[in-house]
Image (spheres, helix red, strand yellow):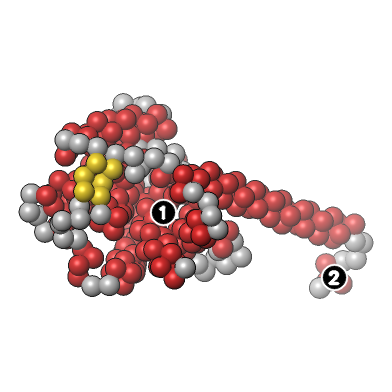
Amino acid sequence: MNSLIMTSLEQGLIFGILAMGVLITYKILDIADLSVEGTFPFGAFIFAKFISIGINPIISTLLAFFFGTLAGLSTAILFTKLRIKPLLSGILTMTILYSVNLKTNGKANVPLFSYSSVYDLGTTVVILIVLVLIIKIALDEFFKTEIGYLLIATGDNESLVRSLGKNSNRYKVLGLMLANGLVALSGALMAQIQGFVDITMGSSIIVVALASIIIGDTIGKRSNRIKNTTRAILGAIIYKLIGGIAIDLGLEPSDLKAVSAIIVIVFLSYNNFFADLIDFKKIKGGEKYAKNKKTIKELQ
């Protein structure tokens, strides 16, 4: 059981990076970007390619991030320049990346057991915690900059950004590149921890990311002090722990996709009913004050 919890924690931290990437497109830019299902294995295949020709694992991992940003750029070009709907742009990029992933190493499955990895530097969980914290702090600080504020504003009110004389498409491109870079980085880290790369490892990965974000939002619903990045990380860890417990209870690994979908449904339903309850209380409270004939001073 302890081994299962540790494995779930390690994978949860990796998926925390994935969730922070999807957070940028899904929550900040309000774009449904399905290209991440191709970008996640793309980062893994890029790592496998460079590590197999003798490149340092740290540099190979960073190269996975860089090539991931290029995948995001391709989606952004389809979206902003060719005016293809963002959902379809992501699907097209994902489809292209499937072929690119197969061409990168010439086969659908690449073993990595004989190569070094970033986890050789120390304890796996410690390395992942440090890496996740660095990315989280970097993102939090980035969102405090002028560019970061404009990126957030592009998702909230694109017309406002344009009225300031800024090109909103530029921030969409930046957001998509950064998001897919983080997703590819997550894929490279996952490949190293599981010891192989497989063409199917990106299947339904968007559901994992969304589940992590939704669980994190549910946790932080009562507190605005918890940053979105922190919520995404916590949500990813909890999601993986739920999956680990499900396997420990006897479910087959093949059932995890169904479990993922059920988790999303349960937490979405809870959030919707919770929001309705809050609205009901507000309406009920408003009705009480509306019918009250006392003056405002008397009520105070």
In the drawing, does residue 289 fall left or right of residue 19? right
Residue furthest out toward the right: 293
Tag 1's secondary structure?
A: helix
Q: Position of residue 215 (x, y in %)?
A: 54, 56
Q: Position of residue 218 (x, y in %)?
A: 58, 58
How crowded pointer 2 is (Cα within 10 Å; few <14, some 14-19, many 20+) is rated as few
In the drawing, does residue 105 fall left or right of residue 241? left
Please name the residue that numbered disc 1 is placed on. Answer: 19
- Of residues 294 and 43, the one drawn nearer to the viewer in this rendering: 43
Q: Position of residue 27 (x, y in %)?
A: 47, 49
Q: Is residue 212 visible?
A: yes
Residue 205 position (above or below residue 298): above
Q: Residue at x 11, y 49 (%)?
A: 52
In the drawing, does residue 194 fall left or right of residue 229? left
The span from disc 1 to disc 2 (Cα, nearest Å) is 46 Å
Q: Is residue 155 visible?
A: no
Callout 1–callout 2 Cβ contact below 8 Å = no
In the figure, residue 73 lies in which quadrant?
Answer: top left
Q: Residue at x 55, y 63 (%)?
A: 220
Q: Residue at x 49, y 49 (%)?
A: 252
How crowded pointer 1 is (Cα within 10 Å; few <14, some 14-19, many 20+) is rated as many
Please name the residue that numbered disc 2 is placed on. Answer: 299
Q: Which mark is residue 135?
A: none
Q: Residue at x 18, y 48 (%)?
A: 48
Amino acid at the residue labelled 1: Ala
Tag 2's secondary structure?
A: helix
Whichever of callouts 1 and 2 sits on the residue coming sooner in the sequence is: 1
Q: Nearer the viewer, mark 1 or mark 2?
A: 1
